[in-house]
Amino acid sequence: MATKNYAGTTVDVNEEGYFTDPSQWNKEIASEIAKEEGIELTDKHFKVLEMLRQKNDAGEALSIRGINKSGVVDVKTFYQLFPGAPLKKATKIAGIPKPASCV
Amino acid sequence: MSDNEHPVKKVNIICAKGNIEDIYATLVLGNGAVMEGIEANLFFTFFGMEGIVKKWMKKPHTAVIGNPAMRMPVLGSRMPTLLGVIPGLESLVSSMMRKQMDDLDVPPIDEFLDLFTAGGGKLYACKLAMDMFKLKEEDLTEHVSGILTVGEFYELAGGEGSHIIFT
């Protein structure tokens, strides 16, 4: 298992850079991962990240449809907040495992 | 696992058949591409028009006759062809399939197209199929960006790292 240093903290990550222990995450760490992905985090981003972490804690499978129905963000905004590969980037920044969903 | 030097940058997916599984193969591939940051164009033609004509797209069907892979629920054995002629069976099997997909968070077609286009995906209708089925632009879902000839489709599909997929 690899480790990475974010905001002065060493965290455990897998070979793709996803957290293996979501409890090691905090907002400063999130901002640093986001910078690596070329994203400057705003309050809107954090609302989405918290929603993703809650869903992950609840054991819910993450899907783009689930995010649309979450009431926190619509899909269009979600794509704008995390351009490129939104669900992959957002989960990485949120410090939770990469989603295994096809939809 | 991946070839980082030659990533897939764009997919152009042709949907020419209108069974549930054909339309969904197109939608899952297309939406999956958009989710990965890959540009996606869907081109609907012939029976694939089932997926974009407003009054047809609500309840797509699957084939219970001539489909050897169709298995019976619970029993798991192949469905005898003769059963397929029972009135209403195709509708029943199709609605069961739609229900199963919904349980897995696979949305109905119109909602799926909402998600796909919100992510920047584009869909197009085939000019020839429009003429053949005597369809007008207003018959199509508002998600459709345009009606194309084959030549225009190929033009659209151009570019490095672009792939054409036939579902």
Image: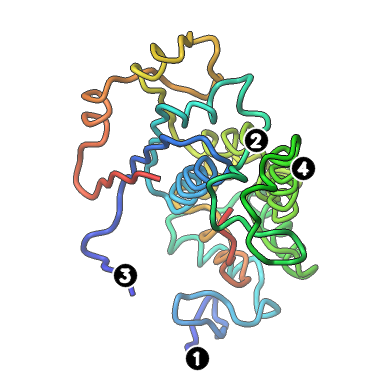
When the figure is inspected, residue B75 is found, relative to residue B132, above or below; the finding is below
Q: x%, y% of residue A99? A: 59, 65
**Residue at 67% over, 29% down:** B58
In space, the residues marked 1 and 3 are separated at their CA atoms by 20 Å
Q: x%, y% of residue B162? A: 25, 46
Query: What amino acid is at disc 3?
Result: Ser
Spot the residue most to the right: A58
Q: Which residue is mark 2?
A: B111
- Observer-side mark, 2 or 1, equals 2
In space, the residues marked 2 and 1 are separated at their CA atoms by 40 Å
When the figure is inspected, residue B117 is found, relative to residue A62, above or below; the finding is above
Q: Which residue is mark 1?
A: A1
On residue A71, which mark appears? 4
Crowdedness of circle 4 by 10 Å Cα count: few (<14), some, many (20+)? few
In space, the residues marked 3 and 4 are separated at their CA atoms by 35 Å
The subunit carrying tag 1 is A
In space, the residues marked 4 and 1 are separated at their CA atoms by 36 Å
If the image is split into quadrants, where does the N terminus of chain B sit?
Answer: bottom left
Residue A63 occupies quadrant: bottom right
Query: What amino acid is at disc 2?
Result: Glu
The subunit carrying tag 2 is B
In the image, taking residue B128 as reference, residue B118 lies left or right, namely: right
